[in-house]
Image (cartoon, coloured by chain):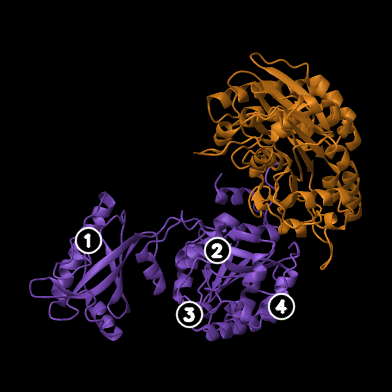
Chain colours: A orange, B purple
């Protein structure tokens, strides 16, 4: 049986509240043999108290050895098998700029490039123009109309933008028009099946118009398109778990991922303190809250061990505000590890703590990789975390008689 | 999504090197309550150093409770789900005598038997003849020709031999001709589908000829056939992981299994010291090396606890030679457990250690079942070991954006 169908069958609404706090890229590594990880180094009295009262473990984001991007990392935490539910690159790019993609959309990553008078590419990134130039060029492209579809062109930064084609029966099996080489022309878009042929036809018309519109705008006088992606067919959190759910995130990408699974997006402000205030104000209105904290990832990506430690300590200081609301289940975890030592996302299982009155004690006393390795949740695939949350919230009936 | 396809999509070539050292049947049991296992008893300073520097865990060869043969045990370690990729008995028997089976082959296990003047079996094993007799009888059978196929008859030992039928469109859905009973004639071969009917037709012709050829050779005056198996369709290690791979094994079975997944088979000599010398000489030419050490299994099968301990200690002494080559990832594990107490392969999870600069410390200090139980790799299915190796070797891009 399908996990989501099982949850639909077993779920009950008892009015309990669940908080999922995702510290992006939380897991780490010691910088030197014999050292501690970022989380083990940080002074985290409030997270440690959660570990003593609750149950901890290590979350495997996808499968052993597979390091996820933010998309699959979060889908796993929301209870969607990240290998079954895939979000295309174009959709992720659109989510990242807070574009509200919908079920009739195909989203595409665009690059401004430079072509010579023969139409051959001489710079695939148009000399990395300033973002203001990107904004200006996107405005020009917004004037283009193609019959039968709606088009949206939105700047990202430098040479990058997002193109969204909205219409009925559009497919995303379309080749990249970026030839990934110089001295060749951008490729023609070709669709693999009738819906994708509709998309390709609209795209080729758009590109032909764009070539005219941008003609005199060297070095941003042409564009290429990559990562055609349809809006994924995905059941909502409400549908699967029966949870009225809210996202309290600062960065667009995570709001977008939450919107994709049907969460309401609340105005989160710009700091974790703001997010906690939002949480408090919305407390009565929702069953489930997803809070996202970015800085454990960005400091890890920077390779700045000490900064990551400081960001973990800053997170710890806000924990009492959340616990003060007395959630029935509170979870702190990450969507993946981002060890400062590696300066990148990694596959290492992610420290996770779950507090609830039904948590079975496991003897762990500090929130860190070593204690989580011996924790009561063991090493588990991230996609099961929501099932555990629902169980500890008293929201799942027993299976079978 | 299929694991192999995922790996093909994510793999990168960074020139790093991986060594997989398989100590066959490595895992064990204490002989007495309160005792230690073979591995815990052995003095293994070099393996212990690997555990302190790396990460350890327990590999589940197939599924909890399933003890594998050498075929599934090794396929799992090479990253092939041993329940999905099955190697027929005839193929395994052929691999075991170093017969280079290929994609046009059906391999079959043969037994010489004794029939009376009515053609009824009186001894299913022909009185277990000496192997020289088996060799002599196989030579006789090699003279038999059947139109449309090539035939190969090779002795194994005592009453056992291998028959390989080579041709186009041959199937392996053919019944055993061994009736597994006395006072009945060997069964006629029948194919379940047209390709298998072609095989059965050739086989029945061969058996009819064999009956004539062996007529006066009682007690080895007839034969039965079992375990018809086609060469499996299996992607190579190169295709899945992009690894140029070499096998350094002494015993034919393991060379055969490695050849099946596309590894180059290097001349390994006859001792682990020889194997290390081969490894050193081939170091520059390959990305991945599979070393096989047989004696931890054979001593376990003999029920000789002390001998298994000694063989583990002998293995430990060679470890510095391998580590001296500075592999980016080095793994020591087994294809299954072979507890001396049981004198057989078992299902018990297998101690495993992985050394790499990205290994997350787990506090383990000795290579043994107890420390591996608390190790950072947890208890994992063997089929994920290669994914972990690829990740730790820096050979996998992140999944999704």
Locate residue A109, reporting x and y percent.
Answer: 73, 32
Q: Quadrant of the C terminus of chain B?
A: top right
For label 4, the SS is loop
The residue where tag 2 is placed is: B77
Q: Residue at x 74, y 44 (%)?
A: A335
Q: Are marks 1 and 2 in contact (CB under 8 Å)?
A: no
The residue where tag 1 is placed is: B202
Q: Earlier in the sequence, mark 3 or mark 2?
A: 2
Disc 2: which chain?
Answer: B
The residue where tag 3 is placed is: B298
Q: Are marks 4 and 3 on the same chain?
A: yes
- Rendered image: mark on residue B324: 4
Locate residue A206, reporting x and y percent.
Answer: 70, 21
Q: Nearer the viewer, mark 1 or mark 4?
A: 4
Q: Relative to the observer, which residue lies in front, B375 or A148?
A: B375
Q: Earlier in the sequence, mark 2 or mark 4?
A: 2
Disc 3: which chain?
Answer: B
User: Can residue A65 be seen by looking at this rendering?
Assistant: yes
Q: CA distance from mark 1 to mark 3?
A: 38 Å
For label 2, the SS is helix
Neighbours of disc 1 within 10 Å: few (<14), some (14-19), many (20+): many
Q: Residue at x 55, y 33 (%)?
A: A5
For label 3, the SS is helix
Q: CA distance from mark 2 to mark 4?
A: 24 Å
Q: Nearer the viewer, mark 1 or mark 2?
A: 2
């Amino acid at each position: 049986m399908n996990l989501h169908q099982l949850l639909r069958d077993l779920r009950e609404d008892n009015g309990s509240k669940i908080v999922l706090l995702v510290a992006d890229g939380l897991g780490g590594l010691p910088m030197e043999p014999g050292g501690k990880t970022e989380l083990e180094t940080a002074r985290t009295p409030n997270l440690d108290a959660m570990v003593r009262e609750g149950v901890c473990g290590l979350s495997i984001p996808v499968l052993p050895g597979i390091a996820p991007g933010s998309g699959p990392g979060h889908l796993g935490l929301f209870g969607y098998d990240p290998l079954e539910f895939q979000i295309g690159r174009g959709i992720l790019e659109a989510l990242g700029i807070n574009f509200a993609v919908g079920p009739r959309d195909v989203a595409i990553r665009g690059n401004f490039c430079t072509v010579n008078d023969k139409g051959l590419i001489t710079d695939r990134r148009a000399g990395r123009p300033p973002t203001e130039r990107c904004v200006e060029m996107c405005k020009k492209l917004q004037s283009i109309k193609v019959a039968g579809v709606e088009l949206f062109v939105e700047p990202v930064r430098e040479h990058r933008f997002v193109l969204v084609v909205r219409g009925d029966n559009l497919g995303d099996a379309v080749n990249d028009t970026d030839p990934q080489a110089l001295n060749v022309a951008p490729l023609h878009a070709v669709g693999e099946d009738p819906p994708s042929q509709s998309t390709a036809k609209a795209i080729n018309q758009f590109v032909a118009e764009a070539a005219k519109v941008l003609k005199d705008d060297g070095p941003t006088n042409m564009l290429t398109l990559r990562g055609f992606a349809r809006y994924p067919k995905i059941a909502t959190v409400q549908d699967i778990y029966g949870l009225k759910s809210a996202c309290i995130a600062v960065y667009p990408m995570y709001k977008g991922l939450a919107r994709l699974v049907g969460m309401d997006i609340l105005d989160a402000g710009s700091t974790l303190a703001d997010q906690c205030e939002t949480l408090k104000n919305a407390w009565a209105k929702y069953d489930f809250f997803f809070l996202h904290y970015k800085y454990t990832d960005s400091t890890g990506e920077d390779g700045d061990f000490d900064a990551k430690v400081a960001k973990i300590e800053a997170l710890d200081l806000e924990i009492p505000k959340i616990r003060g609301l007395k959630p029935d289940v509170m979870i702190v975890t990450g969507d993946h590890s981002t060890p400062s030592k590696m300066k990148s996302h990694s596959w290492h299982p992610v420290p996770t703590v779950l507090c609830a009155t039904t948590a079975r004690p496991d003897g762990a006393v500090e929130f860190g990789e070593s204690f989580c390795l011996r924790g009561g949740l063991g090493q588990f695939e991230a996609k099961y975390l929501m099932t555990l949350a629902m169980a500890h919230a008293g929201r799942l009936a027993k299976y079978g008689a």
